[in-house]
Image: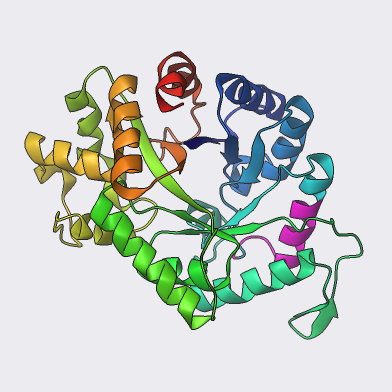
Amino acid sequence: MKVDLRVPVGAPLSEVADVIARAEDAGFDGVGVHDHPHSGRDVYMALALAAQRTRRITLYPATSSPAVRHPVLLASAAHSLEEIAPGRARLTIAPGFLSARSVGRPRAGVAAMREAIGQIRSLLAGKAESVGATETRLRNVSARPVPVFLLAAGPRMVELAGEVADGAMLFVGLHRDAIAAARRHLEIGARRAGRVLAGFPVIFIVTLGLAPTIAQGAAWIRRWFEPGKPLLTYPSAGNLHWLREAGLPFADDLDPAAIDDELARRVADAFGCFGPAEHCAERLLRAKEEAGVDHVFFFPAHDREGGYAMPTAEIDAFARVMRKRLS
């Protein structure tokens, strides 16, 4: 099983690069760094520094949004990263949440994402592309076009990933029924485009809430990401759709404080990995056996105020406990 890790730009960029190097030493296969321009630190500069301090790990933004960065700029940044770290770059894009809000724009819809992915893939392949009223192309491209993944949370975005992207990062939880439903949506999108998904890479985003006990880990389920937004609906209320597929029929006006201990444990088991590192490793192995999950992206549980905490505890737990069990 491949395991990637989300690292925020929550420290000076040289320190962020050091943390990414530690993640590589711990055995992680990839690192995605969030693209929050309002942090005052640029994700692509962080990835460039990390590329110089690592040897094998895959590097990518997690995620950039065409609502914030123009598709030509995204293609150029992705190619630049590929030049620095040949064969180790990935471009992951999403509709945007905090990043789009920070520049006063709404998150991108399905139509905008479809257009942006098509433009970026075309530019990275060295083709001319119409952008507005202008036709443009990248003067320099790589022999290996950087793969463009779509981070998808709701069913329509999942279908779009199957239709137009090179791969998908799916925020659908770990329950086998939810994963099966998500794969059906990928196939719907693929059929729409006349594509076959054999070999189509899928990375499952796994919320990771390390805690001394399972019950303490499950307490995350009752928390709010920010006032008015439960953690279970971050970054998208589409999370509730997949919980319903898993037999947990939450209403859209979910009050997390009303979830009792037993239900919190059930939700935690469907939503991600919560509790001691040993338990989290076993949960991933069960997801592999039940649903064929073979590549995950650890998304450390956090609220808005804690979103920039560096994942040192997660790196240590993976190095000490989880890597051996998962290998």
**Residue furthest top as drawn:** 320
**Which one is in front, 228 or 284?**
284
Please provide percent x and percent y for residue 156. 40, 72
Q: Which of 34 and 186 is in front in this view?
A: 186
Q: In which quarter of the image is residue 68?
A: bottom right
**Residue at the spot 37% in from the left edge and 57% down from the top edge:** 236
The residue located at (67%, 57%) in the rendering is 147
Q: In this view, does 88 lie to the left or right of 63?
A: right
**Magenta stretch contains residue 115:** no
Residue in the image at 44% along x and 43% along y: 294
Toward the bottom, the furthest residue is: 133
Look at the picture and state if 149 lies above or below 15.
below
Residue 248, image x and y in percent? 14, 54
Position of residue 308 measured from the top left corner of the image (x, y, whole percent): 50, 33
Name the one closer to the observer, 31 or 258: 31
Residue 188 in view here: yes
Would residue 13 be found to the left or right of residue 188 on screen? right
Q: Does any portion of residue 227 appear in the rendered image?
A: no
Q: Is residue 224 left or right of residue 206?
A: left
Residue at x 79% of width, y 58% of height: 76
The secondary structure that most of the magenta stretch takes on is helix
In this rendering, the answer to whether 119 lies above or below 83 is: below
Residue bounds of the magenta highlight = 67-79
Q: Is residue 78 magenta?
A: yes
Residue 6 location in percent, x, y?
52, 37
Q: Is residue 95 above or below residue 56?
A: below
